[in-house]
Image (tube, helix red, strand yellow):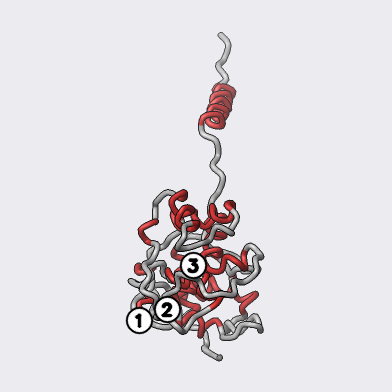
Amino acid sequence: MKKHNLTKTFVGVLAAGLVAFSVTAPVQAEEESAIARGGQLYDKWFAVIGADKPKDTHKAWPSSNTKKKGNATWRCKACHGWDLRGADGAYAKGSYKTGIPGIRKFDGGDPADVIAVAKDATHGLGMIPDTDLADLALFVTKGQVDMTKYINADKSVNGDVAKGAAYYNTLCAGCHGKNGEKPKDMKKSLGKVVSGNPWEGLHKIMNGQPDEAMPALRALPMDIVIDTLAYTVTLPKKK
């Protein structure tokens, strides 16, 4: 009687299964990089796509706010906030107070709806190419983070500072320096920027800096991102 070769049979079944899987369940293209790019477009779209800075104040910018004008008023974050909550969040007061709502309602929504809103008469962003608007819409519908879970009203961060030190020193210090004093063209030290506006810090840790080589950490587990933020808040406020 011929001995049955179990190993050969197993390999054959596994190979057949892999072939079937590849046909019925193709690997999905990753979206994290496109979402991160969308986050940069939300930050400063004209820097990302290499467009000229808008010179006029955006027509939807309320006349009640005279503290900001010109290209600053064209950034999505200027109205809707780093925390994405607009008038219900950190921009309920301060130099960016506009009374304009945030974008939280679009979380989990249809990207096509976001593109339509971006092109409407109020926003007037039809000059942005559709491929770029697609990334922006991905960020708005799939990339939002409820920052109230991680950042408190007093600007403290719910993260592990000790763990964050290790993450910062290995991921960030090469460009920003151990004390957050680099690059030299930064107007303020990293510690001063992030401690004053941790919502901006979280957004840029996750999505990167527009038109810069800063990496986006969006693909990493959220606890690493938050711990890194928590440590960054503690860096010296030198300038």
Crowdedness near tag 2: few (<14), some (14–19) or many (≥20) residues, C-alpha within 10 Å: few
Location of residue 121 in the rendering, given as x and y in whole percent from the top left corner: 46, 60
- The quadrant of the image that shows the C terminus is bottom right
Q: Which mark is residue 154?
A: 1
- The quadrant of the image that shows the N terminus is top right
Whichever of labels 3 and 2 marks the residue nearer the N terminus, that label is: 2
Question: Who's the residue at 54% across and 27% down the image?
Answer: 20
Crowdedness near tag 1: few (<14), some (14–19) or many (≥20) residues, C-alpha within 10 Å: few
231 sits to left or right of 179? left
Comparing labels 1 and 3, the label whose residue is closer to the camera: 3
Question: Who's the residue at 50% across and 78% down the image?
Answer: 232
Question: Who's the residue at 60% across and 55% down the image?
Answer: 129
CB contact under 8 Å: marks 3 and 2: no
Element on which disc 2 rests? loop
Location of residue 149 in the rendering, given as x and y in whole percent from the top left corner: 35, 67
How far is mark 1 from mark 3, CA to CA? 24 Å
Element on which disc 1 rests? loop
Location of residue 91 in the rendering, given as x and y in whole percent from the top left corner: 39, 76
170 sits to left or right of 201? right
Question: Who's the residue at 42% across and 73% down the image?
Answer: 160
The residue wearing badge 2 is 63
Name the amino acid type tagged 1.
Answer: Asp
Q: Quadrant of residue 41?
A: bottom right
In the picture as drawn, the residue positioned furthest to the bottom comes out as 238
Q: Nearer the viewer, residue 47 or 12?
A: 47
The residue wearing badge 3 is 76
Name the amino acid type tagged 3.
Answer: Cys
How far is mark 3 from mark 2, CA to CA? 17 Å
